[in-house]
Amino acid sequence: MNIVQEESRRDRKKLQRRLLLIEIARQLIATKGLRSLKVRDVAEAVECSIGSVYNEFGDFDGLILTVNRETVLALTARLTAVPSDDPLRQLHGLADAYLGFATEHANLLRSLFEHRMEDDRPFPEDILAMVMDAFAVMHAPLVRLLPDHDPGDVALLSRMMFSAVHGIISLGLEERMVAVPPERLRERLAHFIDTHLAGLGIPRR
Amino acid sequence: MNIVQEESRRDRKKLQRRLLLIEIARQLIATKGLRSLKVRDVAEAVECSIGSVYNEFGDFDGLILTVNRETVLALTARLTAVPSDDPLRQLHGLADAYLGFATEHANLLRSLFEHRMEDDRPFPEDILAMVMDAFAVMHAPLVRLLPDHDPGDVALLSRMMFSAVHGIISLGLEERMVAVPPERLRERLAHFIDTHLAGLGIPRR
């Protein structure tokens, strides 16, 4: 084996370990929750040293952020896949898609919103921008439904509605603090959106 | 000093230490967040052993639950103090009160909603009931505003609105994921409630 082959083999192994570390961390967060995630458990599962995990991701936050970035990208992909031909149907579809994602990946979504950086360091800009992109998907259908509204108002309105839907779903899925029974969440969310749109002067579908 | 005096002195000292432990834990959660709370830091601040903390509260969750119980009681007291003479004004007052509490005690409120029991043990029933009591304060004014609605529907509706307001406030106060700028939260919340009530057929104030 020559030097180039040797280097590419090493790069490949390094990449494989990186992907494995991310996958193990994701599984641990998904099953046990972010709060239970220990760097030691990740290292043991991948059979490497704790130092290697830090080397690969800079620090423990780096590993969590990597998992959270993939979560927000998966959520955004799910939201942008909702058909946009009819803006009213699209808004309902977005709420359904968010509910579906939150139901399937409750702990991963919690990790996205509950993760704080150690020592109060600021979040990297890119993940904030990703979350804002996920927020923004509600904007386009609202612009179409409210063509005469001030664009700044519609932007705020879409964030308000996204936050409201997020609150309803996240408290609804907390079994311990059941705001709305999970089996009725889908129907109540649809009713919530219709009521809110009616209040904005948009007739119910 | 006789035996009775000696025992009462010991009880008093025990109670004082308990209150101090709770106060230290509360301050640490309030300033650094629940995720940074370490039983070692609490014990060191009170100059006792870690074992004494466990003895006093059963386990670490026991200490966190004690702080969280006081948080939800303080929140409920703030909400029930809102004047109830006019149901519409009361709903706006409740949203304002929740926003005020969340602004002043951001980390304590987060701790209430983000705390998970170790090893997936269930939450004690009493704290769940306390949270439900906090939820319930929105119910009475909605019943007055919607006298002809099905009571079960109004109960669900009030929980939906509480969850929505909670979502708007909690994401709005996350500086890293600003859904709505904090300085506009109060005005947007009022608009949100008016819009939603208008959608339910209740005229704006």
Image (cartoon, coloured by chain):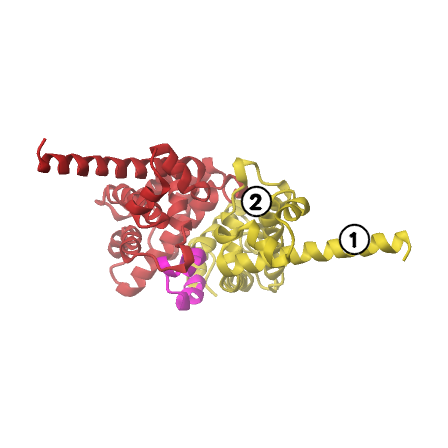
Chain colours: A red, B yellow
Left or right: where A77 falls relative to B130: left
- The residue tagged 1 is B11
Magenta-drawn segment: B168-190
**Is the C terminus of chain A in the top left, top right, bottom left or bottom right quadrant?**
top left
Q: Nearer the viewer, mark 1 or mark 2?
A: 1
Q: Nearer the viewer, residue A36 or B126?
A: A36
- The residue tagged 2 is B151
Quadrant of the rendered structure where residue A154 is? Answer: bottom left
* Residue B177 is one of the magenta-drawn residues: yes
SS class of the residue under badge 1? helix
Crowd tier of the residue under label 1, counting other residues whose Cα lies within 10 Å: few below 14, some 14–19, many 20 or above:
few
Left or right: where A146 falls relative to A121: left
- Total labels drawn: 2
Q: Nearer the viewer, residue B111 or B94?
A: B111
User: Seen from this angle, which residue lies furthest bottom?
Assistant: B183
Residue A133: give x, y in percent of width and height.
27, 53
Q: Nearer the viewer, residue A50 or A86?
A: A50
Which numbered marker is on residue A14? none
Residue A14: give x, y in percent of width and height.
23, 38
Q: CA separation, marks 1 and 2?
A: 49 Å
Residue B198 in view (yes/no): no
User: Seen from this angle, which residue lies furthest right?
Assistant: B2
* Residue A2 is one of the magenta-drawn residues: no
- Mark 2 belongs to chain: B
User: Seen from this angle, which residue lies furthest front?
Assistant: A2
Q: Nearer the viewer, residue B164 or A43?
A: A43
The residue depicted at 41 percent of the width and 39 percent of the height is A40
Residue A150: give x, y in percent of width and height.
28, 65
Instruction: Give the answer, above or below, for where A51 lies relative to A9.
Output: below
Labels 1 and 2 in the same subunit = yes
- Mark 1 belongs to chain: B
Quadrant of the rendered structure where residue A74 is? Answer: top left
